Image (spheres, rainbow, N blue to C red):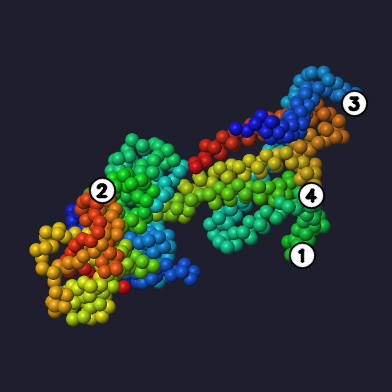
């Protein structure tokens, strides 16, 4: 048995960490959401005004809906890109497997900001895409639609989060015993029905994990709208950022944060249950 | 081959011993490794044929070629008079029981068994009865809604068997299906497999590395060594008349006697016996149980043969020293020293032996084998 001192020594650092950087900040945020700002001063007066504002002013609900829509699009697109890639790499890549894997991972080492600015260069009026289209005489003037639109945000976030979707998916497809696929063919199933009846159901835990990553990370993103989004694609995190910054309304910002937090935690709880339910080994 | 009329039972089909599967000059290379070298083999309808061999002998590869999971490097496989090797696995009327069962973990027992019927679009009304029949056949009907992970090895084995048989294959491939079971269950499953095969009349191609299992189950045994067939014969034939020294050693135990033959007489150590083998060096297989311990009284009555006589005797007597004795219940394993050659002997359980004793064997039991 481990001594009491040992147990204390092992558990103290993580507990301190969690308390200092998670529990206390969350408690502060939670408290702030019930306070208010008057004449530029924070008043420690308990009330529900902030939450009332959230539900009364349709701006917040609209932005939240748009955010969810963008996150859902990113999730769907990353799955559509990530699943075929994971499938191909697991079943058909052969010796190229390791190389391809590294190629998927490498972008993760590149700074998020750099990738954001890269998209700016590609999509802008003087950008690579417009230059190319004009060169081909498909368009005759720069198309301003590419940059500063929800489309650009979805594109950039999809680019950034596809590896996060790919990794758990690839792991779960790799873990499907190959003799199950042989057994399926043996019993008369074509490639197609083997995919839908065996491979897809058995890769669901990875699919859920990947989709959760993409959705939750996109939901909280504020840099993509800032860099490539423009005013038409403000997301909920941008509002929180401005409330804590220039607008100086910490209590309202905290109230929004609490709502997003609850939403995310509920989502994570649900997907975790699903993953457990569909993990068969 | 003519198509059997509808009133012919599978059993009757088996009796006609028409060829079901024909493996013609099959070779398989994995890179530089020649896993199978020019294998030709015929399997009769209704037969229980076992592919026996050590690990790495190519037996599983041959099975996978027939199932369609691998493509042969050269050669052809035919079934019922048609090319089999050009068909994808899902078009072959061949089903497989996998070594570790390969049950689908996300489906319950019933869904696992129904899988083959559903993907081949069997009529919806037929599926429940056929699944129930298959589960009853392997005595698993009370586990219909259990998940594979909750079943024991033996139960999973039964489900895998039901799943493979529900499509009514012409040929069932079994890849070491009993190797994960403990000894007692194994024996029980062996006899159940055998009676199931008799009942259904389906041709079984069974892969194992266990020679006892091969002997107990099969109509014929095909022994593989390093990707080539050593011998294909009934268990009795392969035991009594092993074609090669390897076969003699692999199937049961034996003594290999490197003898010299001249003019119909084989000479080994100081012993001589008549043989039809040609002149020159020859290897004889002499089973341990073919060597008998001679009662001293019995020996006294038999005149000692004249070593130099032209016609060697049909019963060969010799004296040997007991080196070791191992008791194994019903029998005793002896290691004896006969003119500075060690021989293995198996006799019925007796008392502790020591010193010199008289032994004899029949010249008919010394079987000439190829190198």
SS at circle 2: loop
Q: For the point 44% across and 45% down, which residue is it? A: B104
From the image, tell me which residue sits under label 4. A113
SS at circle 1: helix
Q: Chain of mark 2?
A: B
Compared to residue A119, the image places residue B255 above or below, namely below
Distance from Cα at disc 4 to Cα at disc 3: 33 Å
Answer yes or no: are tags 2 and 4 on the same subunit.
Answer: no
* Tag in front: 1 or 3: 3
Q: Which mark is residue A40?
A: 3
Label pair 4/1, CB-CB below 8 angstroms: no
Q: Please report whichever mark, 4 or 3, sits nearer to the chain's N-terminal start.
A: 3
Callout 2: 10 Å neighbours few (<14), some, many (20+)?
A: few
Q: Chain of mark 1?
A: A
Q: Quadrant of the C terminus of chain B?
A: bottom left
SS at circle 3: loop
Q: Quadrant of residue B364?
A: bottom left
Distance from Cα at disc 1 to Cα at disc 2: 93 Å
Label pair 2/3, CB-CB below 8 angstroms: no
Q: Position of residue A14 (x, y in %)?
A: 71, 34
Q: In the drawing, does residue B35 fall left or right of residue B276?
A: right
Q: Position of residue B189 (x, y in %)?
A: 30, 46
* Tag in front: 4 or 1: 4
Q: Which mark is residue B329?
A: 2
């Amino acid at each position: 048995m481990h001594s009491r001192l040992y147990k204390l020594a092992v558990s103290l650092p993580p507990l301190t960490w969690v308390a200092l950087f998670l529990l206390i900040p969350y408690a502060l945020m939670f408290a702030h959401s019930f306070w208010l700002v008057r004449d530029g001063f924070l008043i420690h007066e308990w009330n529900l005004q902030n939450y009332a504002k959230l539900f009364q002013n349709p701006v917040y609900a609209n932005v939240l809906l748009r955010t969810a829509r963008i996150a859902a699009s990113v999730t769907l697109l990353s799955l559509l890109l990530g699943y075929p890639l994971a499938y191909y790499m697991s079943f058909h890549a052969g010796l190229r497997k390791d190389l391809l894997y590294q190629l998927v991972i490498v972008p993760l080492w590149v700074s998020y900001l750099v990738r954001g600015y890269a998209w700016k260069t590609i999509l802008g009026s003087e950008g690579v895409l417009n230059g190319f289209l004009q060169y081909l005489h498909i368009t005759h003037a720069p198309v301003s639609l590419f940059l500063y639109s929800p489309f650009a945000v979805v594109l950039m976030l999809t680019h950034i989060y596809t590896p996060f979707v790919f990794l758990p998916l690839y792991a779960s497809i790799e873990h499907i015993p190959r003799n199950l696929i042989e057994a399926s063919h043996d019993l008369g199933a074509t490639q197609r029905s083997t995919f839908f009846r065996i491979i897809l159901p058995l890769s669901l835990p990875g699919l859920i994990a990947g989709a959760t990553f993409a959705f939750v990370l996109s939901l909280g993103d504020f840099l993509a709208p800032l860099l490539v989004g423009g005013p038409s694609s403000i997301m909920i995190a941008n509002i929180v950022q401005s409330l804590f910054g220039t607008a100086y309304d910490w209590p309202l910002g905290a109230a929004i944060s609490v709502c997003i937090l609850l939403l995310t935690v509920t989502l994570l709880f649900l997907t975790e249950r699903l993953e457990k339910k569909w993990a068969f080994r | 081959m003519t198509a059997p009329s509808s009133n012919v039972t599978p059993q009757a089909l088996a009796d006609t011993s028409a060829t079901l599967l024909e493996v013609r000059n099959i070779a398989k290379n994995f890179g530089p490794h020649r896993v199978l070298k020019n294998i030709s083999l015929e399997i009769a309808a209704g037969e229980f044929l076992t592919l026996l061999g050590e690990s790495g002998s190519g037996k599983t590869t041959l099975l996978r070629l027939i199932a369609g999971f691998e493509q042969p490097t050269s050669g052809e496989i035919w079934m019922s008079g048609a090319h089999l090797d050009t068909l994808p696995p899902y078009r072959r009327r061949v089903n497989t029981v996998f070594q570790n069962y390969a049950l689908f973990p996300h489906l319950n027992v019933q869904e696992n068994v129904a899988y083959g019927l559903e993907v081949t679009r069997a009529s919806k009304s037929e599926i429940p009865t056929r699944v129930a029949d298959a589960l009853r056949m392997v005595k698993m009907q009370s586990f219909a809604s259990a998940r594979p992970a909750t079943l024991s090895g033996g139960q999973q084995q039964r489900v895998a068997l039901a799943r493979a048989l529900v499509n009514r294959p012409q040929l069932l491939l079994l890849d070491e299906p009993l190797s994960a079971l403990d000894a007692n269950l194994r024996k029980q499953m062996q006899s159940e497999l055998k009676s199931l095969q008799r009942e259904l009349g389906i041709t079984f191609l069974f892969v194992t590395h266990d020679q006892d299992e091969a002997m107990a189950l099969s109509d014929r045994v095909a022994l593989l060594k390093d990707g080539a067939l050593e011998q294909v014969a009934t268990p009795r034939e392969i035991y009594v008349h092993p074609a090669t020294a390897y076969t003699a050693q692999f199937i049961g135990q034996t003594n290999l006697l490197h003898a010299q033959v001249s003019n119909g007489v084989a000479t080994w150590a100081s012993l001589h016996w008549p043989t039809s083998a040609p002149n020159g060096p020859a290897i004889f297989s002499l089973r341990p149980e073919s060597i008998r311990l001679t009662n001293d009284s019995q020996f006294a009555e038999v005149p000692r043969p004249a070593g130099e006589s032209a016609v060697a005797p049909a019963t060969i007597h010799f004296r040997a020293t007991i080196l070791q004795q191992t008791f194994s219940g019903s029998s005793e394993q002896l290691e004896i020293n006969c003119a500075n050659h060690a021989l293995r002997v198996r006799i019925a359980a007796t008392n502790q032996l020591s010193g010199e004793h008289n032994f004899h064997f029949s010249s008919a039991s010394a079987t000439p084998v190829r190198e």
